[in-house]
Image: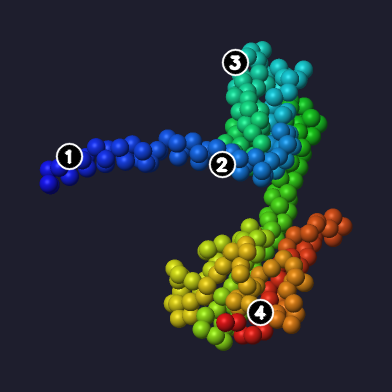
Amino acid sequence: MQKGLTIVGIPLAKLDSIQYAFDFELYCIHAIVHSISILAEFLISPWHTYLTHHLPKLLLGSAPLALYACAPTGLERVLLQTNDKTNSPHSPSVVRELLTPYVIFVLLISGLGHKEWRFVIYVVPMINVAAAVGAKRLIAFPTGFLRALGQLAVLGLVVGNIAATLLLTAISRTNYPGGKALEFVNSLPPSSGSRTTVWIDNLAAQTGASLFTQAHSPPYFNTSSSSDSWAYSKDPNPTSYDQFTYLVVEDPTAYPTEKWNFVGSVEAFERVDIKRLRVMTKPTLFVLRNKAGAR
């Protein structure tokens, strides 16, 4: 009997493994197709985005210097003080040869609809090398007037680069209201019920309200938080908002004042006031507390 079951069982097991086995190759193909379909619906940018948006912001003052290093000039032999333009490391033709593979890479990757700055950051070091060549050529004019003009241009680009970096940093600091909002919520008193629960909407989740900011849930970074564990939810369609102690929302008017108290708001970037040289912000995320003391 036992031998009979074994004889029958082996072919059945083999047939079952063939019929229902996990196909790793099919899984990979499905994952790739699914990822492409998702990217086709979201974050699609024009073909020129790298050239007109991402690279100018990454390079700032290096961009015009690199262009100058590539541009042929009638004063090249005077600037380099040599008749051998081909072999000179400062020659525009040499710089163009160095940058050609990187330019081709940017043009090729521009054919993809989904674009992010991190995809082209690899070209920045070589463009900075070309910018250094351009700066050297500007400050190497043989005459006093042209040399002073070139030095002033390089100094102006460096100062402008620093100023633009400070401005963009100030703007970036106001682009993450979600993190600030959750930091504010963590400082509020807990629920009078058994557990404190926080609901985080989509905008807050995309602007810094990550797992690292959930201070009252494991893992704990300080011992004072472990005594009262909170629950944080990013469920886009909760069954009821009444189950939460706090809400972090973009539109507070969508929640009735009979049930929710306004606790505070967090501001985010709106515009740059050129006249006063200030980064202007506006209330973007709002924190509401359940009047029922939250269950």
Badge 3: few (under 14), some or many (20 or more) residues near its Cα, within 10 Å? few
Residue 74 percent location from the top left of the image = 77, 17
First in sequence: mark 2 vs mark 4 = 2
Q: Nearer the viewer, mark 3 or mark 4?
A: 4
Q: Nearer the viewer, mark 3 or mark 1?
A: 1
Residue 177 percent location from the top left of the image = 67, 64
Badge 2: few (under 14), some or many (20 or more) residues near its Cα, within 10 Å? few
The single residue placed furthest to the top in the displayed view is 83
Residue 63 percent location from the top left of the image = 70, 35
Residue occupying the point 60% across, 34% down? 123
Reading the image, the residue beneath label 1 is 7
Identity, as a three-letter code, of the amino acid under mark 1? Ile
Residue 173 drawn above or below residue 184: above
Is the C terminus in the top left, top right, bottom left or bottom right quadrant? bottom right
Helix, strand or loop at mark 4: strand
First in sequence: mark 2 vs mark 3 = 2
First in sequence: mark 3 vs mark 4 = 3
Reading the image, the residue beneath label 2 is 35
Identity, as a three-letter code, of the amino acid under mark 4? Arg
Q: Nearer the viewer, mark 2 or mark 3?
A: 2
Identity, as a three-letter code, of the amino acid under mark 2? Ser
